[in-house]
Amino acid sequence: MTLAPDPRIVRLDAVGSTNDEARRLAEDGAPHLTLVAARRQTAGRGRRGRSWVSEPGNLYCSAVLRPAGPPDRAAELGFAVSLAMAESIGPEARCKWPNDLLVNGRKAAGMLMESGPVRGGMMDWLIAGIGVNVAQAPADTEFPATSLHAEGLGAATVDGLLEGFAGRLAAWLEVWRDAGFAPLRAAWIGRAHGIGGPVTLRLPRETLHGRFADLDETGALVLDSGGASRHISVGDVFFG
Ligand code: BTN
Protein backbone atom coordinates (compact mmCIF):
# COMPACT_ATOMS: atom_id res chain seq x y z
CA MET A 1 0.00 0.00 0.00
CA THR A 2 1.31 3.46 -0.84
CA LEU A 3 0.41 6.53 1.17
CA ALA A 4 -2.20 8.93 -0.23
CA PRO A 5 -0.61 12.19 -1.41
CA ASP A 6 -1.26 15.22 0.77
CA PRO A 7 -3.81 17.54 -0.81
CA ARG A 8 -2.50 20.95 -1.80
CA ILE A 9 -4.94 23.84 -1.32
CA VAL A 10 -4.74 27.00 -3.45
CA ARG A 11 -6.75 29.79 -1.79
CA LEU A 12 -8.03 32.65 -3.96
CA ASP A 13 -10.24 35.68 -3.39
CA ALA A 14 -12.66 36.27 -6.30
CA VAL A 15 -12.72 34.02 -9.37
CA GLY A 16 -15.21 33.29 -12.14
CA SER A 17 -15.56 29.61 -11.25
CA THR A 18 -13.18 27.49 -9.19
CA ASN A 19 -13.85 24.69 -11.70
CA ASP A 20 -12.29 26.86 -14.42
CA GLU A 21 -9.29 27.72 -12.21
CA ALA A 22 -8.80 24.04 -11.40
CA ARG A 23 -9.04 23.14 -15.09
CA ARG A 24 -6.31 25.70 -15.88
CA LEU A 25 -4.09 24.20 -13.18
CA ALA A 26 -4.76 20.67 -14.48
CA GLU A 27 -3.81 21.73 -18.01
CA ASP A 28 -0.57 23.14 -16.56
CA GLY A 29 0.19 19.76 -14.94
CA ALA A 30 -1.09 20.26 -11.37
CA PRO A 31 -0.88 17.01 -9.40
CA HIS A 32 -3.71 14.80 -8.15
CA LEU A 33 -5.56 16.40 -5.22
CA THR A 34 -4.77 20.00 -6.01
CA LEU A 35 -7.70 21.91 -4.50
CA VAL A 36 -8.72 25.44 -5.49
CA ALA A 37 -10.90 27.38 -3.06
CA ALA A 38 -12.26 30.89 -3.51
CA ARG A 39 -13.93 33.34 -1.13
CA ARG A 40 -16.48 34.15 -3.83
CA GLN A 41 -17.26 33.31 -7.46
CA THR A 42 -18.56 35.73 -10.06
CA ALA A 43 -19.76 33.01 -12.46
CA GLY A 44 -20.39 29.96 -10.29
CA ARG A 45 -21.98 27.09 -12.18
CA GLY A 46 -24.41 24.41 -11.08
CA ARG A 47 -25.52 21.24 -12.84
CA ARG A 48 -27.56 21.45 -16.06
CA GLY A 49 -26.35 24.95 -16.91
CA ARG A 50 -27.81 26.52 -13.76
CA SER A 51 -25.91 29.30 -12.02
CA TRP A 52 -24.63 28.88 -8.44
CA VAL A 53 -24.95 32.00 -6.28
CA SER A 54 -21.49 32.46 -4.74
CA GLU A 55 -21.31 35.27 -2.17
CA PRO A 56 -18.65 35.26 0.58
CA GLY A 57 -19.50 33.12 3.60
CA ASN A 58 -19.99 29.79 1.80
CA LEU A 59 -17.46 27.24 0.56
CA TYR A 60 -16.54 27.11 -3.14
CA CYS A 61 -13.89 24.59 -4.01
CA SER A 62 -12.74 22.40 -6.91
CA ALA A 63 -10.34 19.48 -6.90
CA VAL A 64 -8.05 18.32 -9.68
CA LEU A 65 -8.24 14.51 -9.67
CA ARG A 66 -5.95 12.19 -11.62
CA PRO A 67 -7.70 8.93 -10.80
CA ALA A 68 -5.98 6.30 -12.99
CA GLY A 69 -9.18 4.76 -14.29
CA PRO A 70 -11.24 4.59 -17.47
CA PRO A 71 -13.75 7.39 -18.14
CA ASP A 72 -16.77 5.12 -17.62
CA ARG A 73 -15.81 5.04 -13.91
CA ALA A 74 -15.84 8.83 -13.52
CA ALA A 75 -19.27 8.86 -11.85
CA GLU A 76 -17.92 6.68 -9.02
CA LEU A 77 -15.61 9.50 -8.00
CA GLY A 78 -18.56 11.80 -7.38
CA PHE A 79 -19.54 9.50 -4.53
CA ALA A 80 -16.05 9.84 -3.02
CA VAL A 81 -16.45 13.63 -3.13
CA SER A 82 -19.94 13.48 -1.55
CA LEU A 83 -18.81 11.15 1.22
CA ALA A 84 -15.74 13.26 1.96
CA MET A 85 -17.77 16.43 2.36
CA ALA A 86 -20.55 14.65 4.29
CA GLU A 87 -17.96 13.42 6.79
CA SER A 88 -16.40 16.86 7.03
CA ILE A 89 -19.83 18.36 7.84
CA GLY A 90 -20.80 15.65 10.33
CA PRO A 91 -23.50 13.04 10.96
CA GLU A 92 -26.29 15.52 10.10
CA ALA A 93 -25.26 15.45 6.41
CA ARG A 94 -27.16 12.93 4.30
CA CYS A 95 -26.43 12.02 0.69
CA LYS A 96 -28.98 12.78 -2.04
CA TRP A 97 -28.48 10.97 -5.32
CA PRO A 98 -26.36 11.54 -7.22
CA ASN A 99 -24.10 14.02 -5.44
CA ASP A 100 -25.98 16.56 -3.31
CA LEU A 101 -25.87 16.77 0.47
CA LEU A 102 -28.93 17.44 2.59
CA VAL A 103 -29.28 18.58 6.16
CA ASN A 104 -32.73 18.09 7.67
CA GLY A 105 -34.05 17.25 4.21
CA ARG A 106 -32.88 20.46 2.55
CA LYS A 107 -29.98 20.93 0.16
CA ALA A 108 -26.82 22.23 1.81
CA ALA A 109 -24.24 21.28 -0.83
CA GLY A 110 -24.02 20.48 -4.53
CA MET A 111 -21.35 19.10 -6.78
CA LEU A 112 -20.33 19.63 -10.38
CA MET A 113 -18.02 17.07 -12.00
CA GLU A 114 -16.40 18.12 -15.28
CA SER A 115 -14.42 15.66 -17.35
CA GLY A 116 -11.02 16.25 -18.90
CA PRO A 117 -9.00 14.45 -21.56
CA VAL A 118 -8.61 10.70 -21.87
CA ARG A 119 -5.22 9.22 -22.80
CA GLY A 120 -4.70 5.58 -23.65
CA GLY A 121 -8.21 4.76 -22.43
CA MET A 122 -7.60 6.32 -19.00
CA MET A 123 -8.76 9.62 -17.53
CA ASP A 124 -5.88 12.09 -17.54
CA TRP A 125 -7.65 14.38 -15.08
CA LEU A 126 -11.12 15.53 -14.12
CA ILE A 127 -12.48 18.33 -11.99
CA ALA A 128 -14.78 17.89 -9.00
CA GLY A 129 -16.32 21.17 -7.84
CA ILE A 130 -18.33 21.43 -4.65
CA GLY A 131 -20.25 24.29 -3.10
CA VAL A 132 -21.44 24.20 0.51
CA ASN A 133 -23.99 26.63 1.94
CA VAL A 134 -22.22 27.41 5.20
CA ALA A 135 -23.64 30.80 6.23
CA GLN A 136 -26.41 31.40 3.69
CA ALA A 137 -28.59 29.63 1.15
CA PRO A 138 -30.33 30.91 -1.98
CA ALA A 139 -34.09 31.45 -1.84
CA ASP A 140 -36.58 30.21 -4.45
CA THR A 141 -34.70 27.09 -5.52
CA GLU A 142 -36.51 24.18 -7.14
CA PHE A 143 -35.34 21.80 -4.40
CA PRO A 144 -35.48 23.50 -0.96
CA ALA A 145 -32.07 24.82 0.11
CA THR A 146 -30.60 25.57 3.50
CA SER A 147 -27.31 26.52 5.13
CA LEU A 148 -25.36 24.72 7.83
CA HIS A 149 -25.74 27.69 10.18
CA ALA A 150 -29.52 27.78 9.63
CA GLU A 151 -29.67 24.12 10.63
CA GLY A 152 -27.90 24.70 13.92
CA LEU A 153 -24.38 23.78 12.78
CA GLY A 154 -23.09 27.16 13.89
CA ALA A 155 -19.56 25.90 14.54
CA ALA A 156 -19.03 25.05 10.84
CA THR A 157 -16.45 27.29 9.16
CA VAL A 158 -15.37 27.48 5.53
CA ASP A 159 -11.73 26.72 6.43
CA GLY A 160 -12.58 23.89 8.82
CA LEU A 161 -14.83 22.21 6.26
CA LEU A 162 -12.22 22.60 3.54
CA GLU A 163 -9.42 21.06 5.61
CA GLY A 164 -11.66 18.19 6.70
CA PHE A 165 -12.86 17.60 3.15
CA ALA A 166 -9.33 17.53 1.72
CA GLY A 167 -8.22 14.86 4.17
CA ARG A 168 -11.32 12.70 3.79
CA LEU A 169 -11.19 13.01 -0.02
CA ALA A 170 -7.60 11.76 -0.08
CA ALA A 171 -8.63 8.83 2.12
CA TRP A 172 -11.70 7.86 0.03
CA LEU A 173 -9.76 8.09 -3.23
CA GLU A 174 -7.19 5.76 -1.77
CA VAL A 175 -9.97 3.30 -0.86
CA TRP A 176 -11.36 3.59 -4.40
CA ARG A 177 -7.93 2.94 -5.90
CA ASP A 178 -7.20 -0.06 -3.68
CA ALA A 179 -10.63 -1.67 -3.26
CA GLY A 180 -12.81 -0.25 -6.03
CA PHE A 181 -16.28 1.27 -5.78
CA ALA A 182 -17.91 -1.31 -3.46
CA PRO A 183 -16.83 0.27 -0.11
CA LEU A 184 -17.87 3.72 -1.33
CA ARG A 185 -21.24 2.36 -2.44
CA ALA A 186 -21.80 0.77 0.99
CA ALA A 187 -20.82 3.95 2.85
CA TRP A 188 -22.99 6.09 0.58
CA ILE A 189 -26.02 3.82 1.05
CA GLY A 190 -25.48 4.10 4.81
CA ARG A 191 -25.88 7.89 4.59
CA ALA A 192 -28.43 8.02 1.76
CA HIS A 193 -31.59 10.09 2.00
CA GLY A 194 -34.78 8.47 0.76
CA ILE A 195 -33.49 5.01 -0.16
CA GLY A 196 -36.36 2.50 -0.13
CA GLY A 197 -38.96 5.26 -0.43
CA PRO A 198 -40.94 6.93 -3.22
CA VAL A 199 -39.10 9.21 -5.67
CA THR A 200 -39.79 11.29 -8.72
CA LEU A 201 -36.92 11.32 -11.19
CA ARG A 202 -36.75 14.09 -13.72
CA LEU A 203 -34.69 12.95 -16.71
CA PRO A 204 -33.77 15.05 -19.75
CA ARG A 205 -36.79 13.76 -21.72
CA GLU A 206 -39.20 12.19 -19.22
CA THR A 207 -40.31 12.16 -15.62
CA LEU A 208 -40.50 8.85 -13.76
CA HIS A 209 -42.17 7.87 -10.50
CA GLY A 210 -41.36 4.81 -8.42
CA ARG A 211 -39.38 3.49 -5.48
CA PHE A 212 -35.69 4.25 -4.94
CA ALA A 213 -34.74 0.57 -4.58
CA ASP A 214 -30.95 0.65 -4.57
CA LEU A 215 -27.69 2.15 -5.79
CA ASP A 216 -26.13 -0.22 -8.31
CA GLU A 217 -22.47 -1.22 -8.61
CA THR A 218 -21.81 1.66 -11.05
CA GLY A 219 -23.52 4.37 -8.98
CA ALA A 220 -26.77 4.36 -10.99
CA LEU A 221 -30.08 4.74 -9.13
CA VAL A 222 -32.24 1.61 -9.32
CA LEU A 223 -35.86 2.66 -9.75
CA ASP A 224 -38.65 0.12 -9.25
CA SER A 225 -41.89 1.09 -10.92
CA GLY A 226 -44.79 -0.92 -12.25
CA GLY A 227 -43.01 -4.22 -11.61
CA ALA A 228 -39.93 -3.24 -13.65
CA SER A 229 -36.50 -1.98 -12.58
CA ARG A 230 -34.60 0.75 -14.38
CA HIS A 231 -31.02 1.83 -13.73
CA ILE A 232 -30.79 5.61 -14.09
CA SER A 233 -27.44 7.35 -14.49
CA VAL A 234 -28.50 10.99 -14.97
CA GLY A 235 -31.41 12.89 -13.48
CA ASP A 236 -32.80 15.12 -10.75
CA VAL A 237 -34.46 13.44 -7.78
CA PHE A 238 -37.45 14.71 -5.81
CA PHE A 239 -38.84 12.81 -2.83
CA GLY A 240 -42.39 11.91 -1.90
C1 BTN B 1 -25.37 21.82 -8.27
O1 BTN B 1 -25.91 21.38 -7.26
O2 BTN B 1 -26.03 22.22 -9.23
C2 BTN B 1 -23.86 21.84 -8.33
C3 BTN B 1 -23.30 23.08 -7.73
C4 BTN B 1 -21.78 23.12 -7.78
C5 BTN B 1 -21.23 24.42 -7.28
C6 BTN B 1 -19.74 24.39 -7.11
S1 BTN B 1 -19.12 25.82 -6.25
C7 BTN B 1 -17.50 25.36 -6.64
C8 BTN B 1 -17.50 24.85 -8.08
N1 BTN B 1 -17.38 25.96 -9.01
C9 BTN B 1 -18.48 26.11 -9.75
O3 BTN B 1 -18.63 26.98 -10.62
N2 BTN B 1 -19.39 25.18 -9.43
C10 BTN B 1 -18.92 24.30 -8.38
Image (tube, rainbow, N blue to C red):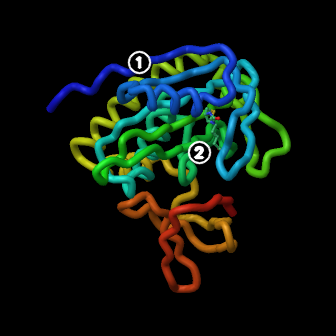
Q: In this view, does 180 lie above or below 235?
A: above
Tell me the residue at 51%/33% (across/down): 23
Q: Which residue is farthest right?
A: 140
Circle 1: is it few (<14), some (14-19), or many (20+) Cα within 10 Å? some
x and y percent of residue 17 in the render? 65, 30
- Amino acid, disc 1: Arg
x and y percent of residue 34 in the render? 43, 24
Q: Is residue 186 above or below residue 7?
A: below
Tell me the residue at 38%/48% (across/down): 118
Residue 89 appears in the rendering: no
Residue 39 appears in the rendering: yes
Q: In this view, does 19 lie above or below 11?
A: below
Q: Is residue 160 above or below residue 130?
A: above
* Ligand 1 under 8 Å from disc 2 Cβ: yes
Q: Which label sits on residue 8?
A: 1
The kind of secondary structure element at disc 2 is strand
Q: Mark 2 points at which residue?
A: 100
